[in-house]
Amino acid sequence: MKKNKPLFLRVSPLLLALLCVVTLIAFPRAQHANQTASGGTNDDRVALYQALLDLTNPWTVMCIAAHPDDEDGTSLIVMRHKYGAHTVSLFSTFGEGGQNAIGPELYEELGAIRARETMAAAEIQGSEPHFLGLKDFGYSKSAEEAFRVWGHDEALRRMVLQIRKLRPDVIITNHSVANNDHGHHQATARLEVEAFDAAADPKRFPEQLKDGVTVWQVQRLFVRAGRSSEAQADNAPTVTIDPNESDPVRGKVYAKEALEALHKHATQGPWPETVAQMAARFTNSSDVRLPIIRYRLVREAKGAGAALTKDSHNFLDGLKLAENIEKELHPPVIEGQPLTNFVDQRPRVFDALDTESHTGVPLDYQNADSQRFERFSANWERALGLAANVTLDLETSPKVVTPGSPMTVTFKVTNRGPRSGGIFGCVASIPSLAQPIHANKSVNISYHGDPLNAGSTVERSQRIQIPAETIVNVPLSKHLYDNSVSELKVDATCSVFVSKSLFNVEMPTQVDVAPPVQIEKIIPSPVVLTPLNFERMDVNNWAVRPVVFSVRLINHQPMPFKGNLNAAGSVVDKRANSVAIKLAPGQSKTFTMVLNPPAAGSMTFSLSDGKISAPPKQIPVFTALARVSPNLRVGYIRGFDYSLPNALASLGVESTELSVEEVKKADLQKYSSIIIDNRVYESQPELIAANQRLLDYTKNGGTLIVFYHKSNEWNPDERRKRPQLAPYKLILGDERITDETAPVTFIEPQHPLLNTPNKIGPDDFANWIQERGLYYPKDWDPQFHALLQSNDPGEAPLKGGLLVADYGRGHYIYTSMVWYRELRAGVPGAYRMLANMISYGRPPR
């Protein structure tokens, strides 16, 4: 097999020939006939084993999922780590419409985090993540709703394009078209079935068929059993994956590897810490084994190969390449055995690769399977480098660059093997720009001719210029949908000569590309004005009192910045809306501006020195006529979002964040009300043991307000030592209202909670964001008063969105409505309702 020529081999054959002669003289081949030790760390051993295994499998398996963490990480891991298949994952969305279990970021900010989490999980899975970039608008109950937002044809176009580019032989999915599944899942499942045929049809999206993109026929499509509503015969072809099987090289079961990858999706946690805890989610028994994963074959291309057997454990079983292609992609062996059997004998493995890599016929890159050949060639070079125990480490400085700025790339090539060799040269390139970048653009060599003796490390630095046309991707949330969230890719490659082989060792890396200067954050945002913010000027006129804004700026440049920070939209003298600023190279600094915002609308902040400008940042302004009772003192146990304390500050009430230890020991009766934020019993489970203190506080005259929790975080559970948390029976279900415009009916319109100090009406539920509520109570004690009801179209009303009960001398309120999203979005009705809840039981102003 003759491999594709390495990078520098394509630069100057004459120079290469001269260098080869010098190298052979300067670095004689080391004696190693009796050496059997693997050398290096266990990670090196695992990497070599995986590289050798990858050489044995020319196929690609793709897992398609609607959101990050929906992928079947276990099956991806088994296919890569056990069988050596090339694995990729494709996600319809970035998951930006979900909840955040570790921080305050939501929407596009959350999507940017989840994209990076998915990349980290994929590192463990051994897969490549890709995104369609469709909008995650929150939980949906139907595919039709998803397609109304996504556009069916546009979503299909994007999926077909990715299939044609990535060329999977097999597609697997967790999702089904069942009507009881998430609407995004249903829509993604339908798209997969359509794309199976459309990707192979030249009449579908013909404009894609250029720049190397061709039609592609997927061979098989599998849907996870138990999640498919399609009728299947009992004898339908099935593939089973055992997550409890042990990975012999990594020394752990595949389920544990999958759980480690799942932990990278931290914003969607908390996740079980052990496989046993994960297993407990699926069974009530003491069995620590996870259920077998089963997939049904639902589509297969004509002539795909031999039929699957009923006891198959591999999605690729029976698939066949053309005979001439299969012959070209055949890896070397030692004594008729695969190279993986000799992973602890690196010298023998290197010899096998070193010898055979110089025989065979040139690759035909015009072949329809050119990607398969290119991947095989890259795998061969990676295996050669690992067998020689030659590695490349890379450092870039700075980590965040700006268009047109310099960046230093430091190459560190280490030879841990027994043979000496040489470095022909190293180069850094930006593949997205389709051209290499160098200190000297006239040649492709940054340095060359360095010896690489056994046991030595060669370190060199190259200063390169980031092209001025490079696309900015900072802040990530602003560029989530423009394909820049994955950073600027920098390929670093060194061409190394050991024995008869000249091969590349590669270390791709990424850097973020920021504007020269950036307005990173403005507080408050949004600005929510309440009666506290207004003062009467005369009988008919009111003025907005000044608001203090904190504006955080970053200078990403390697040079100082001097300019002006301006705020447009203020209603006072414009000369007061500008602040002179100075920033040192790379400096972050917060500036204060005291401004009078408009009563409604927005304010725009900009930064410029006359030549360089930061992208402007707009802050919405809302007015909420929300009154509160006097002398309130609110304690709160915060979740991960800051919407609650920010809203309390806007209402002008005195508030204190409480720790669990303070709940256990402090005098709680000094608080007129205490709020338990979203999902705190899950994020701070130690609060469960202190819950009686909160109930005693309520019984003795306080008002306890609990925001929504998930059913499996709230309902009594002996295994988790979780009692009934409310003073009376209150059991949550999994029902939700996803239509943010769903009409809200007042069951007890005269109840004080809906009338004091603000009279709540239908207008207070206008302009809501994303949904009405989720995990609605399904069963509660008659002591509770249900004040509201609502429902999605065609469904039965849900009445548990706002429950209130007297308990002793105090009051208990549970609400499953998504007040935190509405408070964050500045919806006036949410502020008025929050004002009523914290004022409940107190005399009005």
Image (cartoon, helix red, strand yellow):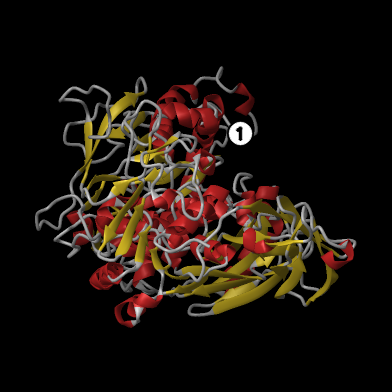
Helix, strand or loop under label 1: loop
Q: Residue at x 61, y 34 (%)?
A: 212
Instruction: Report the number of numbered marks.
Output: 1
Q: Amino acid at mark 1?
A: Gly
Taking the image as shown, residue 87 lies to the left or right of residue 483, namely left
Rendering coords of residue 406 (x, y %): 76, 67
* Residue 55 visible in this rendered orientation of the protein: yes
Above or below, 227 against 3 in this view is above
> In this view of the protein, can residue 463 be seen by the observer?
no
In depth, the one of 452 and 565 nearer the eye is 565
Q: Is residue 737 above or below residue 142?
A: below
Which residue is drawn at the image coordinates 27% and 65% (left, top)?
273
Residue at 66% across / 66% down in the picture?
400
- Which residue has dot 1 on it? 212
> Is the residue 804 above or below the residue 740 in the image?
below
Q: Splitting the image into 4 quarters, where does residue 703 fall?
A: bottom left
Q: Position of residue 448 (x, y in %)?
A: 68, 69
Q: Nearer the viewer, residue 164 or 40?
A: 164
In the foreground, 35 or 383: 383
Residue 325 in which image quadrant:
top left
The one nearer the camera, 198 or 693, is 693
- Residue 490 percent across, percent down from the top left: 63, 58
User: In this image, 469 relative to 768: left or right?
Assistant: right
Q: Residues within 10 Å of mark 1 (few under 14, many from 20)?
A: few
Q: Residue at x 50, y 71 (%)?
A: 631
Residue 618 screen position, x and y as percent: 71, 54
